[in-house]
Image: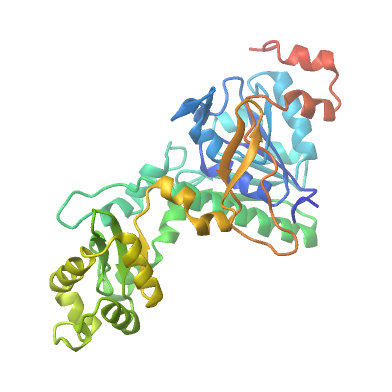
């Protein structure tokens, strides 16, 4: 067993992040994931930082896959894809219509090859409705679903989230949907279509803000580094300029903070309750800031952790890679890449005790496993060479 999904085959016919990362998550748990790319490769192969011809956005989300190049604009490529679909349990795609049907990847076309296929389609806004067919990415979903309006300092401009959290959330929902459909297929013997959109993923994530609107007709304001619900909560500078996060969602944590910093804040009439501290955030933040500035971040963090205070460093990415808990959790793992040699990638975040997932394959170079996979489908060496030589039908 390579994981709980050993024996499940997934075809990844998607590009950029949300679709490919969903397939990767299934591959982490042992599925045989085959990524089909056009001759020019996934678009993410041409963006971002580069080393040895490989690009960071592709490497980030395509581990645990075999890479195959098929020209689906060519009849031979579509025929080969059809053979692959017939062997697959799951197909994940984010190709939009009319290209989806032209390339032979629609749900009904996939069902013609395997009736019980689980087909997962990723779109920006949904497969139908007023926005159907529009192009879209994480940034646009942030605009439509209200995230940009909530992000940033109250006195400054609205800003986007730099981390592609919408794409990542979408990939998680796609993987969840696939697992649910696989479970149901075990009982019914039937496949089904799954649709997940970036818009729906982020509206789903806005549940707390929407609850405020539905329950109290309140639109959440931008709060910057502060919390809307409790205080103190913010980012403070230590000696030398290093930053630390401190947050106190309950009276217990506020008392622990005061005790750790040698302050009598809980008895101060301005700070006796969460409601009062919210009214006097500037004053409590000023007092915390003045005390934090007298410690190095390492000393302060040790002191706060020992006092059971909710605190964390504001790490840069190199700090994250070195973090002892991140390393202990095996969230950075090294694997051998076909051309780059040893390559660090992110690990498997869900830890199954009996059938754990693992990172077994590095992100493939373009077409790395084409010959291997086509040979498994019964193609001869001559047929594979001819297929790779150019289109037969334009």
Which residue is drawn at the image coordinates 25% and 72% (left, top)? 232
Give the left or right position of residue 324, taking residue 103 as reference: left
- Depth order, front residue of 96/89: 89
Which residue is drawn at the image coordinates 37% and 48% (left, top)? 316
**Residue 105 seen in this snapshot:** no
Q: Position of residue 125 (x, y in %)?
A: 45, 46
Q: Position of residue 60 (x, y in %)?
A: 53, 39
Q: Is residue 359 above or below residue 387?
A: below
Give the left or right position of residue 338, taking residue 320 as reference: right
Report the label total.
0
The image quadrant where one finds the C terminus is top right
**Residue 190 seen in this snapshot:** yes
Residue 242 falls in which quadrant of the image? Answer: bottom left
- Depth order, front residue of 171/107: 171
- Depth order, front residue of 311/140: 311
Q: Position of residue 379 (x, y in %)?
A: 84, 22
Which residue is drawn at the image coordinates 73% and 19% (left, top)? 76
Residue 33 falls in which quadrant of the image? Answer: top right
Which residue is drawn at the image coordinates 81% and 52% (left, top)? 1
Give the left or right position of residue 264, taking residue 176 as reference: left
Q: Position of residue 197 (x, y in %)?
A: 49, 48
Please, which colouring scheme is shown?
rainbow
Q: Is residue 111 above or below residue 69?
A: below
């Amino acid at each position: 067993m390579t994981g709980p999904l050993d024996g499940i085959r997934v075809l990844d016919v998607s590009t950029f992040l949300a679709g490919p990362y969903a397939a990767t998550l299934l591959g982490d748990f042992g599925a045989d994931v085959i990524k089909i790319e056009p001759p020019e490769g996934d678009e993410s192969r041409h963006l971002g930082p580069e080393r040895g011809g490989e690009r960071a956005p592709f490497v980030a989300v395509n581990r645990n896959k075999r890479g195959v190049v098929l020209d689906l604009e060519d009849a031979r490529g579509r025929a080969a894809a059809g053979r692959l679909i017939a062997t697959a349990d799951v197909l994940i795609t984010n190709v939009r219509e009319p290209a989806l049907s032209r390339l032979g990847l629609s749900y009904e076309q996939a069902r013609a090859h395997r009736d019980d296929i689980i087909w997962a389609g990723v779109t920006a806004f949904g497969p139908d409705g007023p926005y159907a067919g529009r192009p879209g990415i994480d940034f646009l979903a942030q605009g439509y679903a209200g995230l940009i309006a909530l992000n940033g300092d109250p006195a400054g401009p609205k800003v986007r989230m730099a981390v592609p959290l919408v794409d990542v959330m979408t990939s998680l929902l796609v993987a969840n949907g696939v697992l649910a459909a696989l479970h149901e297929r075990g009982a019914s013997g039937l496949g089904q279509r799954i649709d997940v959109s970036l818009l729906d993923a982020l509206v789903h994530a806005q549940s707390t803000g929407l609850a405020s609107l539905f329950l109290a007709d309140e639109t959440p304001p931008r709060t910057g580094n502060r919390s809307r619900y409790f205080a103190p909560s913010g980012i403070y500078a230590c000696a030398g300029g290093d930053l630390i996060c401190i947050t106190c969602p309950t009276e217990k944590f506020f008392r622990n903070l005061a005790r750790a910093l040698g302050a009598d804040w809980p008895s101060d009439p301005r700070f006796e309750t969460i409601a009062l501290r919210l009214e006097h955030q500037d004053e409590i933040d000023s007092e915390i800031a003045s005390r934090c500035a007298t410690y190095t971040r390492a000393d302060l963090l040790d002191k706060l952790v020992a006092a059971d205070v909710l605190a964390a460093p504001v790490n840069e990415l190199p700090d994250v890679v070195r973090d002892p808990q991140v390393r202990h959790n095996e969230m950075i793992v090294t694997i051998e890449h076909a051309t780059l040699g040893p390559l660090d990638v992110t690990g498997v975040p869900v830890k199954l005790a009996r059938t754990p997932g693992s990172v077994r394959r590095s992100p493939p170079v373009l077409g790395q496993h084409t010959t291997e996979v086509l040979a498994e489908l019964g193609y001869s060496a001559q047929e594979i060479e001819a297929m790779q030589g150019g289109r037969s039908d334009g």
